[in-house]
Image (cartoon, helix red, strand yellow):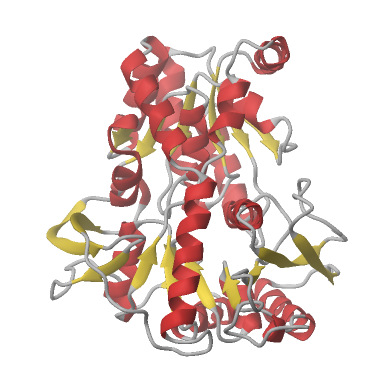
Amino acid sequence: MTSPPGSAPPGTGRLRVALLSYSTKPRGGVVHTLALAEALAAAGQDVTVWTLGRGGDSGFFRTVDPRVRQRVVPFPEIPGEAVGPRILRSIAVLREAFDGSGYDIVHAQDCISANAAGRCVRTVHHIDHFTTPELAACHERAITEPYAHLCVSAAVAAELHAGWGLRATVIPNGVDAARFAAAAGRNPAAVAARRGWRARLGRYVLAVGGIEPRKGSLELLDAYAILARQRPAVRLVIAGGETLFDYRDYRARWEQRARDLGVTPVVLGPVPEADLPSLVAAAAVFAFPSAREGFGLAAMEALAAGVPVIASDLPVLREVFGGAARFAADTQDFAGGLLGALRTRDPALRAAGSRLAASYTWAAAAAQHLRFYQTLLASTGVHSPAQPAHLTGQVVTIAAVVPGSFKQRKGQTIVPLNIMPFGYADDRSAGMENRPKRCHVA
């Protein structure tokens, strides 16, 4: 017998949870969705993941724990379809297929699935800006219509509150640290895999996430060109790049910039899931020049593999990585950071990175999600727009920033946040001088 929404199966305390994503591809939000689903299932919950099967996909980019049900809705490609119509069709197709009536919790991980699901819990992974009207409207609704919000960092929760007056519970990502640490270990297979990458690529700086504006790809090229003048044998390697959006114009600018600078990066594109840890572990340095992030999962995986990370000096990355990474405020600083990491290994920094990555577990994230779900059901009922009861906790500070990759600078106003246990983020200040008045969330 199916329990009604808002109640667990009688006598079991087991929740029926639907997690919704927009793709089967290895993007950060999809990685998050699958890992959370598996951890919730391991904790005894009844979990189903819903997504769109783009390009003929009938399953996810990796094998999923069989305790997690998968519902992949076919989404055939239409040649030449523009981003706006594709967004609208994505919402319509997933909405037509999805029925949330059999679940206690419906939890969307992105704007497309939030629009398709109707009223739901929403994880806001990061704040972004969009000019495509359909996409901008999609993201606005995905912020305002969910009845409860989660963020993976306090910095993003502060932006959400500043832009919309919404409170979000902060639950950090987990990291599969053991998998990436093993790729850096002494096991003969791991050693052979790293040697294979180095034989193919030489000594290299690695960036994961493809070539797109949010990843700071153009700025990374500029930093690498400075580095290459002193270390011409070191290569820049770009992995990843599965995305819903059309970045062909940006990619063309990036390729032209590389020609103008006289550098030849290696673009691998999407890397098979089984090969990614060894690719990361074999890198000399991990470059993380993002203009916007919510947490920084790829960089955290690099730390788990013992690879030094040079990152943009963003408040969110300061919050998440603390003293375990080195930060760069502009292109020259970034190049200097890369060069410093190539010249000298820092055992203390490496140990700090390994400890930090190991501290973020999906089991802990799942436990916090479960507590959040149970609080929602106990205090409001799943379909109520009211927020759960307020809790108390520690105080942290987040600095406002002006958007823009390496050009970001700390604002003049410090925003105090209350981060409660499993963390209600409550901005008690009057505002942030540099906050976006109306942003859109990715």
Q: Looking at the image, which is closer to me, 18 or 336?
A: 18
| Residue 175 visible to an observer of this rendering | yes
Q: Residue at x 86, y 69 (%)?
A: 76
Number of numbered markers: 0
* Residue at the limit of the structure toward the front, as seen here: 11
Is residue 49 or residue 408 the one in the foreground? 49
* Residue 103, x across and y down, in percent: 66, 79
Q: Which corner quadrant of the image does residue 355 belong to?
A: top left
Residue drawn at x 67%, y 62% is 244
Q: Residue 160, image x and y in percent?
A: 35, 71
| Vertical side of 296 occupied by 339: above or below | above
Snapshot quadrant of residue 100: bottom right
Residue at 34% across / 36% down in the picture?
331
Q: Nearer the viewer, residue 206 or 351?
A: 351
Please state, as top left, top right, bottom left or bottom right, where the N terminus lies in the image: bottom right
Q: Position of residue 365 (x, y in %)?
A: 48, 53
Q: x%, y% of residue 275?
A: 72, 30
Judge by depth and name the residue closer to the eye, 39 or 80: 39
| 99 shown above or below 196 | below
Note whether 66 is above or below 256 in the view shown.
below
Q: Residue at x 38, y 10 (%)?
A: 343
Say if residue 129 shows up in the picture: no
28 with respect to 332 (left or right)? right
**Residue 393, image quadrant:** bottom left
Query: Does 112 sit left or right of 366 as displayed?
Result: right
Q: Is residue 326 left or right of residue 183?
A: left
